Amino acid sequence: MKDVVKFFDGLPWIVKIILSLPFIDGIAWGIYRIAKGVDKKDTAMLIAGIVWLFLGFFLFWVIDLITTILNGRPTFLA
């Protein structure tokens, strides 16, 4: 799981923005949150990743897009 987290953390800023677009966000950042939750043994992050897989497509992508543009990474739960 550390490899997945390192991969996503090492992506260029523009690729992170592309991954924050609708429909891509739910899969990409959902998997990232699940991997990071398992790696850190953080239940909240794991649950957020699972929720992101289902709702990230429609609701949460806007939040990830804005925070990725401003901070260079998705929301606080990543």
Image: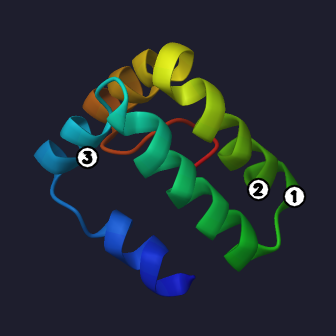
Question: Answer yes or no: do the residues labelled 2 and 3 have beta carbons within 8 Å?
Answer: no
For badge 1, the amino acid type reads Thr
For badge 3, the amino acid type reads Lys
Q: Where is residue 55 in the image (x, y as percent from the top left)?
A: 62, 25
**How far apart are labels 2 and 1 at the CA level?**
5 Å
- Characterize the local packing of mark 1: few (<14), some (14-19) or many (20 or more) Cα atoms within 10 angstroms: few
Q: What's the residue at 76%, 56% (across, down)?
A: 46
Q: Name the residue under label 3.
A: 16
**How far apart are labels 2 and 3 at the CA level?**
20 Å
Q: What's the residue at 71%, 36% (across, down)?
A: 51
Pick whichever of labels 3 and 1 is earlier in the sequence. 3
Question: Answer yes or no: do the residues labelled 2 and 1 have beta carbons within 8 Å?
Answer: yes
Q: In this view, does 78 lie to the left or right of 64?
A: right
Q: Is mark 3 on a helix, strand or loop?
A: helix
Q: Mark 1 points at which residue?
A: 43
Q: Is mark 2 on a helix, strand or loop?
A: helix
Pick whichever of labels 2 and 3 is earlier in the sequence. 3
Q: Name the residue under label 2.
A: 46
User: Which quadrant of the rendered structure holds the N terminus?
Assistant: bottom right
